[in-house]
């Protein structure tokens, strides 16, 4: 006796499975073109170094615009990469969590940026502004758990994802960035 002969409902079940499969395939085909249009993704991790490398790659490849949201910002190499981008004509703007900006190491990094002409604002509207995002040229998004800090680079277990050539997603992140920027106050170096 086979499975089919023991189960009188097999044709109905088979039809049901086939219909579900076809439905899933049709739905996937509708989503696939949009997903295919959204290009490559890369991931990196810290403290192995691949996370920091990806962050720096995003900054170094920017041609016109960098928008940064950061909970904490103390990494001198990332600050220097942003300053180098500014010097090559990239419009660089950074919004950070206001409470975190009171820490000595963060003050030093923010002063370095501000004195180099990078526009910096402090957002104190939320309990914490925990975003860690860079949007480059309205096309590329870097996000993940990686704070732009020495600890994230060298000591913490962190992750970074970069979505290259994704203007749709970049637009959504830019709207979020713009709302946080608009709520924030300009940073004034204390010394």
Image (cartoon, rainbow, N blue to C red):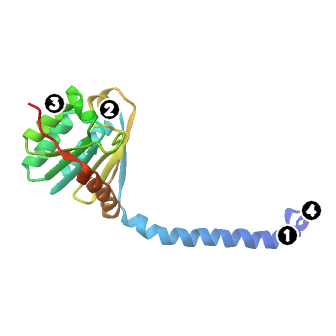
Q: Distance between the residues labelled 1 and 4?
A: 15 Å
Write the residue at 37% across / 29% down: 156
Q: How far apart are marks 3 and 2 (CA)?
A: 17 Å
* Residue 97 badge: none
From the viewer's perspective, is the residue at label 3 or at label 2 nearer?
3
Quadrant containing the C terminus is: top left
Residue 136 appears left or right of 157 = left
Write the residue at 81% across / 73% down: 11
User: Looking at the image, can residue 74 be seen?
Assistant: no
The crowd level at tag 4 (other Cα within 10 Å; few <14, some 14-19, many 20+) is few
> Which of marks 4 and 1 precedes in the sequence?
4
User: Looking at the image, can residue 118 be seen?
Assistant: yes
Label 2: which secondary element: helix
* Residue 1 badge: 4
Label 4: which secondary element: loop
The crowd level at tag 1 (other Cα within 10 Å; few <14, some 14-19, many 20+) is few
The crowd level at tag 2 (other Cα within 10 Å; few <14, some 14-19, many 20+) is many
Residue that badge 3 annotates: 108
Q: In this view, does 147 lie above or below 5?
A: above
Is 134 or 17 nearer to us in this picture? 134
The crowd level at tag 3 (other Cα within 10 Å; few <14, some 14-19, many 20+) is some
- Dividing the picture into quadrants, the one containing residue 24 is bottom right
Q: How many marks?
A: 4
Residue 36, given in percent of the width and then of the height, sits at 40, 65
Residue that badge 1 annotates: 9
Label 3: which secondary element: helix
Q: How far apart are marks 2 and 4 (CA)?
A: 63 Å
Write the residue at 8% across / 45% down: 117
Residue that badge 2 annotates: 152
């Amino acid at each position: 006796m086979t499975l089919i002969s023991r189960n009188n409902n097999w044709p109905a079940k088979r039809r049901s499975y086939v219909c579900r499969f076809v439905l899933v395939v049709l739905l996937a085909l509708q989503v696939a073109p949009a997903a295919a249009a959204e290009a490559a993704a890369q991931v990196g991790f810290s403290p192995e170094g691949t996370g920091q490398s990806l962050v720096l790659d995003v900054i170094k490849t920017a041609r016109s615009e960098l928008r940064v949201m950061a909970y904490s910002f103390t990494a001198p190499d990332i600050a220097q990469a942003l300053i180098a981008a500014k010097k090559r004509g990239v419009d660089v703007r950074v919004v950070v969590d206001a409470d975190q900006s009171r820490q000595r190491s963060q003050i030093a990094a923010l002063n370095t940026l501000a004195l180099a002409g990078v526009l910096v604002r402090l957002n104190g509207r939320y309990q914490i502004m925990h975003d860690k995002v860079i949007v480059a040229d309205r096309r590329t998004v870097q996000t993940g758990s990686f704070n732009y800090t020495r600890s994230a680079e060298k000591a913490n277990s962190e992750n970074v994802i970069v979505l290259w050539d994704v203007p749709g997603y970049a637009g959504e992140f830019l709207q979020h960035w713009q709302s946080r920027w608009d709520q924030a106050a300009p940073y004034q170096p204390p010394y």
